[in-house]
Image: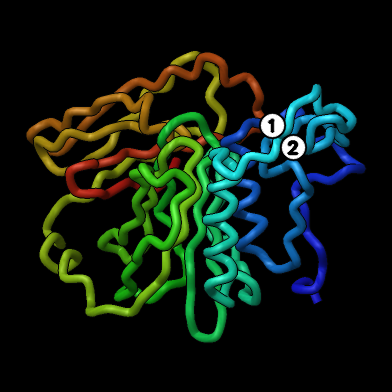
Amino acid sequence: DPGLQPRFVDNHDVDRFLANGSKAGMSQALLMLMTIPGIPVIYYGTEQGFRGQRDSMFAGGYGSQGVNHFDQSSPLYRQLQRIIAMRNGDPLFRRGAPVPVYSDASGAGALIYRIDFDGRQMLVAFNSADHRALAGPVDAGLPRNSDLSPVFHLDEQDDSSARFDPGGQLLFELDAHAGVVWEVHRGPENPVAAASASIRDPQLEPIADIVRSAALSVHGTAEPGSELQLLLDGNMERAAEVRVMDDGSWQASVDLDGMVDPQTPHRLQLWWPAQHRVSAAR
């Protein structure tokens, strides 16, 4: 039974997470630990940001440098309190079955999974990248009339969002280093899809699987006069602005400098911020 297996981020037999990782990554790891099956085990000092394997908590102990490190007001301590309270407050996080629905293959980026339990569902999304990222369209296996309400944000100032597109798939806009939990509710059919059916969706024409130049020329169609963004691997902070001509056509050039590993997949998408619509990935 995976629900009875202990889970940990670090312990006394391995390097601390923060020996090589970041505090943002630690926060994400702790949120994941509390939203997957198993018994979460927090090694003492993790909540204080310890980096040494066996450093002592209190002054006088090994590696303490004469300092009392127990601080109930430290940001990581208080954040972990919030995560634990969320887990303790809902059996779904302790007994639910996680179902992966999305992950970025090109490197740091989005990881999203759904949790099912007793007829209820939650969505958990992370963005491990240093930039705001778009993930989608995502088929999360949810009815089209689902409604999402935020349950938890690692950063209480987080501006991440998840919404359905007209095709019934989800689009996630995730802040850098985000960790967000949404609860899924059933609601009325989304009227936006019918009202906007006449709008011309952004289209990106197919491109070659292998490109041997430092720049890639791309083109497609979209709503005439619309202002779009060309996103590489979902990076919303390095988006290239695209202006659609009156006949609905557009073209742009993508800089491929630095993409030297042919084994690393990349994706290109056309994003329409005003309508929250995105093309299929190429």
* Kind of residue at disc 1: Gly
Question: In the shown orientation, is residue 252 left or right of residue 139?
Answer: left
- Which residue is farthest right? 13
Mark 2–mark 1 contact, CB under 8 Å? yes
Q: Which of 2 and 103 is in front in this view?
A: 2
Q: Nearer the viewer, residue 221 or 68?
A: 68
Specify few, some or many for label 1: CA neighbours under 10 Å numbering under 14, 14-19, or 20 or more: few
Q: In which quarter of the image is residue 16?
A: top right
Residue at 53% across, 66% down: 114
Q: Element type at marker 1?
A: loop
Q: Element type at marker 2?
A: helix
Q: Position of residue 224 (x, y in %)?
A: 11, 39
Q: Nearer the viewer, residue 49 or 274?
A: 49
The quarter of the picture where the C terminus appears is: top left
Residue at 41% across, 44% down: 174
Q: Is 49 above or below relative to 258?
A: below
Specify few, some or many for label 2: CA neighbours under 10 Å numbering under 14, 14-19, or 20 or more: many
Q: Which of 102 and 154 is in front in this view?
A: 154
Residue at 55% across, 63% down: 85
Scheme by which the image is coloured: rainbow
Question: In the shown orientation, is residue 180 left or right of residue 223?
Answer: right
Kindly identify which numbered label has been placed on residue 144.
none
Name the residue carrying label 2: 17
Q: Is 81 above or below relative to 14?
A: below
Q: In which quarter of the image is residue 209?
A: top right
Q: Where is residue 161 in the image (x, y as percent from the top left)?
A: 34, 51
The quarter of the picture where the N terminus appears is: bottom right
Q: Where is residue 275 in the image (x, y as percent from the top left)?
A: 19, 48
CA gap, disc 2 and disc 1: 6 Å
Residue at 40% across, 54% down: 137
Kindly identify which numbered label has been placed on residue 21.
1
